């Protein structure tokens, strides 16, 4: 085989093999270095393991130290089975020394971030010798919640003002208003930091014209992270009054006015007719006279008949 072809064939294989070996070595170095990482949020609880088994018999003889690497501050120590917590971590740090010794840090603060070393010493020839060391990296995050947008009313005609705000995050944030990808001019933007917790609060206001449709985005950026909120506005469309025919309106008004009058007239007439005396018999005397006249007519009628027969 041609040597040039042979080298071209073997070189890629050797390169991939070398890369694989480097990756394995890097993984072994990270594993053997004893460094682990714990990521938590502010006010959460973190458990930092030491990864070393201690029997009940050795517990009274070994010494366990937890300290922060940055400034070598001691966090907690266990000597002769008794735990001592340093003032800065008092009332919020609990040791667990059975089997795998660990520490539990409550109500995490931003200042708790850092590398913690667990050191275990055993008595050897009248002294103490370190038999185990473990480093744990603690990262305390402070994420901003999604911002809220509130209506502040109308400072002037056709102008509305809204405010966007969020709090409880770290590091220092930057807030911007966007519409269609374009940054807008905000007003009254404020950023404040709590002196104890070191957490930030940010708010910003925006004025806009209510006669147009809008879709605003409130974007808060802190470090490499962002949170946002969207505010949509639909312009007010006044509705026109329905069309009415004036002639029809007047006709309806007249008819609606005549109907009650007609009803009233009918009622009055009915009452008058009911209360009017009988035309045939206005009084008792009148009725008696008419009865007498009827009797006389009946008596006289045959007389006229007889006279007619005699004449013949």
Image (cartoon, rainbow, N blue to C red):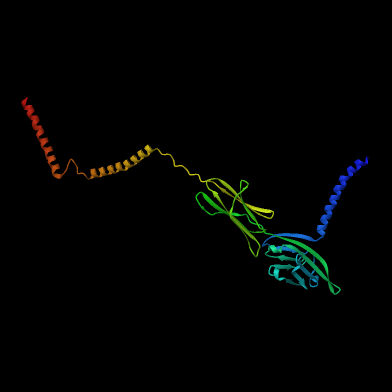
Quarter of the image with the N terminus is top right
Residue at the top extreme of this rendering: 312
Residue at left offset 30%, top offset 42%: 261
Is the residue 64 above or below the residue 18 in the image?
below
Residue 289: give x, y in percent of width and height: 12, 41
| Residue that sits furthest to the left in the current view | 311
Q: Where is residue 38 in the image (x, y as percent from the top left)?
A: 73, 60
Closer to us: 270 or 168 = 168
- Viewer-proximal residue, 131 or 11? 11
Residue 272 place in picture, x, y as percent: 23, 44
Residue drawn at x 27%, y 42% is 265
Q: Position of residue 109 (x, y in %)?
A: 68, 63
Vertical order, 280 against 195 (above or below): above
Q: Is residue 40 left or right of residue 13?
A: left
Among the 4 quarters of the image, the one containing residue 82 = bottom right
At x 86%, y 49%, the residue is 17
**Residue found farthest to the bottom:** 126
Q: Is residue 293 visible?
A: yes
Q: Quadrant of the C terminus?
A: top left
């Amino acid at each position: 085989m041609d040597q040039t072809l042979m080298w071209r064939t073997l070189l890629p294989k050797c390169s991939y093999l070398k890369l694989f070996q480097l990756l394995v070595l890097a993984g072994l170095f990270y594993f053997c270095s004893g460094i682990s990482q714990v990521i938590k949020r502010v006010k959460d609880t973190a458990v930092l393991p030491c990864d070393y088994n201690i029997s009940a018999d050795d517990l009274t003889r070994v010494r366990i130290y937890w300290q922060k690497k940055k400034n070598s501050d001691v966090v907690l120590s266990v000597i002769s089975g008794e735990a001592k917590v340093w003032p800065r971590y008092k009332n919020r740090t609990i040791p667990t020394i059975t089997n795998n010794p660990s520490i539990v840090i409550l109500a995490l603060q931003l200042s708790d971030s850092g590398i913690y070393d667990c050191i275990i010493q055993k008595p050897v020839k009248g002294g103490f010798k370190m038999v185990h060391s473990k480093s744990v990296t603690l990262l305390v995050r402070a994420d901003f919640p999604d911002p809220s947008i509130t209506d502040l009313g109308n400072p002037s005609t056709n102008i509305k003002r809204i405010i966007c705000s969020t709090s409880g995050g770290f590091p220092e944030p930057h807030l911007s208003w966007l519409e269609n990808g374009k940054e807008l001019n905000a007003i009254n933007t404020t950023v404040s930091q709590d002196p104890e917790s070191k957490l930030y609060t940010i708010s910003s206001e925006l004025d806009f014209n209510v006669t147009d449709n809008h879709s605003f985005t409130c974007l808060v950026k802190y470090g490499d992270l962002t949170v946002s909120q969207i505010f949509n506005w639909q312009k007010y469309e006044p509705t026109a009054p329905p069309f009415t025919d004036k002639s029809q309106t007047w006709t309806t008004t007249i008819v609606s006015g005549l109907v009650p009058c007609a009803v009233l007239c009918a009622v009055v007439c009915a009452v008058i007719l009911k209360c009017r005396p009988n035309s045939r018999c206005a009084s008792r005397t009148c009725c008696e006279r008419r009865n007498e006249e009827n009797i006389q007519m009946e008596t006289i009628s045959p007389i006229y008949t007889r006279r007619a027969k005699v004449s013949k």
